[in-house]
Amino acid sequence: MTAIVTLPESQRYARSVEASKRVHWEVEADVIRGRRFDTAHKFLPDGLALSHEFTTLSPAEKRFVSQIQGRTYANVFGLVERFINAKVLELSHDHWFGDQHALEALVGFSEQELKHQALFRRIDAMIGEVLPPGYRFDVDANAVAYAVLGKSTWAVLALTLDIELFTQTHYLESIDHDTNLSELFKDVFLFHWKEESQHAILDELELVRHDSEVSETQRDRAIDEFIELVAAVDGILQAQAKADAAYFAGTCGRPVSEAESRDIETAFLKSYRWQYIHSGAQQPHFAKVLSGLITQEQGQRIQAALATLQ
């Protein structure tokens, strides 16, 4: 039986609906606005790209790395929003004949995720127009979505909350104040952040609601599945770090030795693990929400798993 949503929770869903209406935007009219990317600027800030880890590269080459990472950022978000949208639509079923504020909030969430996927496809194509040919992102979004959705709802919601909280961290701590970034890419982050801020609220509401319906045994298994999902994300990051390092070496305009290529791949992987795993795991609100649902021993299992991804 679906849990009854209390009045305060219903009000939080309603406030999210109103906030989403206030920040509504369109891909072409509000974000792109007829602009093109300029390779004279970074696409990701140093705090996300971890430029200091690329110790053998010149400033211009580090800028190129930020542009490669910017394209991968767009592709990774297009990837994860495929399964997030499917899960949100599934969860909306629980509210069909219940709290209509919650139903409206989740339907709006789904519409926005579809728009975000369109935005990131657009950004990938636009970056492809200004960077050298040869970039590859060979991850099947549908196959990943099927695999993720094969896990428990608790595990998927925990991963989703993690993702949508770290998008806020990325914008507020690394992007908003960087004056050397592409203005177009800053706007991509800005408009994405405006709606993801509301999505994180809904993720939390749905995770807590769902958690109240699972047994201790189901929750314990779900934590293992959450760890498995993080490991699967890391597998994607390892493959993309290898692909992006090879792309850099083949298009940077100078010979890159085998040893330097290995160092560059290591730096790409470290930056990707920071962007998509550790920046979320270390997000204070994520830790607060999770610690309110799990035991100390379960939290230690998660931390031990994360510690292997360095």
Image (cartoon, rainbow, N blue to C red):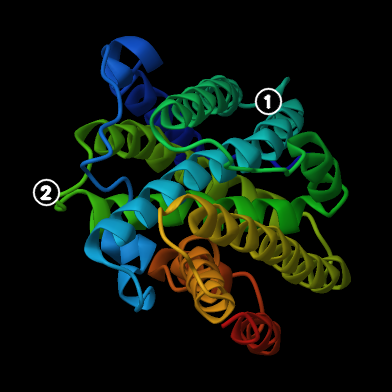
Q: Position of residue 260 (x, y in %)?
A: 50, 77
Viewer-side residue, 223 vs 232: 232
Residue at image position (88%, 48%) is 150
Which amino acid, mark 1? Gly
Q: In the rendered image, is residue 106 in sight?
A: yes
Q: Nearer the viewer, residue 217 or 98?
A: 217
Quarter in which the N terminus is drawn: top right
Residue type at the position of mark 2:
Thr
Disc 1 on helix, strand or loop? loop
Relative depth, front residue between 306 and 119: 119
* Up/down of 42 relative to 18, above or below: below
- Please name the residue shown 39% across and 17% down the image: 27
List x then y, in percent, for residue 216.
82, 72
Tell me the number on the disc at residue 126. none
Question: Looking at the image, which residue sits at the far front?
Answer: 255
* Residue 292 visible somewhere in the drawing: no
Residue 53 falls left or right of residue 172: right
Residue 51 vertical placement versus 120 (above, below)? below
In this rendering, position of residue 176 left or right of residue 272: left
Position above or below: 92 against 219: above
Question: Which residue in the structure is indicated by mark 1?
Answer: 98
At numbered mark 2, what does the secondary structure look like: helix, strand or loop? loop
Marking on residue 179: 2
Of labels 1 and 2, the one closer to you = 2
The residue positioned 46% from the left and 68% from the top of the image is: 271
